[in-house]
Amino acid sequence: MSYLRNLFPKFLLVGMVFFASSAYSQGQVKVQIPEDSAIADGKLTKEELAKFAVVGQRQLVHLIERATDEYSALLENSAPNMPAAWMLMDDGETVKRINLDGQVDGSPAQVRILVYRAALKSIARRGKINAAVILYTGKVDTAGSSEALVIEHEHRLGISGNKVIPFEVVEGKVKYSAPVTREKPYQMFYDEDATPDGQS
């Protein structure tokens, strides 16, 4: 889905680019994190955040593209869409979908979202992943005629947000409109009352 590759990088964390260190190559996704760095304990200084901001952005784009490609196939059929979640492993490249089959059967979408958040938080706090996303659909307006894809995303480098993307299915294909990004409290890698730069 080449249109996704053009759409998401343009809108995802555009403001983070100016923090880039010129030492990182354009194609780099993987990052070596020193064991003695503040990242190891889940807290970052502002200097570390600036140093790894572009790497974090690229990793999130990589994760969101993979997750959205898979989730778009679900949107193309007429069945009700349930939330789904993916995680970027600590190697910075491997993307895995979380499978909760059998654990949330019959549960409404909101309950599934809560279960995904709890599962991702548990994995994130053990340092096993670099980023996580939860995808689900919702209504754009009270009349309920327009739908949007919601992408909750977090990265261990202190990036957190909700991306809301209106969509429609035309002739069996998903067509996305321009996304809107909203702030989201930290829920997986950090507690909201503890800032990602290590300051409480």
Image: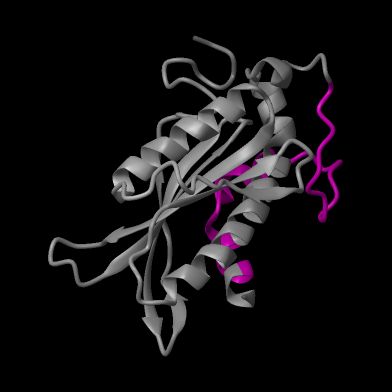
Picture residue at 42% right of the left edge, 90% below the top: 171
Q: Is residue 31 magenta?
A: yes
* Quarter of image, res 104: top left
* Residue 164 image offset from top left, x and y in percent: 39, 56
Please give the name of the residue rendered at 38% of the width and 57% of the height, measured from the top-left corner: 82
In this rendering, the answer to whether 197 lies above or below 121 is above
Q: Quadrant of residue 123?
A: top right
- Measured along the vertical axis of the image, is residue 118 above or below residue 164? above
87 and 57: which one is in front? 87
**Numbered range of the magenta stretch:** 5-34
Q: What residue occupies the far left of the structure in this picture?
A: 143
Of residue 101 and residue 189, the one placed in the foreground of this image is 101
Is 142 positioned to the left or the right of 64 in the image? left
Indicate whether residue 101 is drawn in magenta: no
Q: Position of residue 24 (x, y in %)?
A: 84, 44
Q: Is residue 117 left or right of residue 44?
A: left
Where residue 89 appears, x then y in whole percent? 71, 40
- Relative to 186, residue 6 above or below: below
Q: Residue at x 61, y 60 (%)?
A: 65
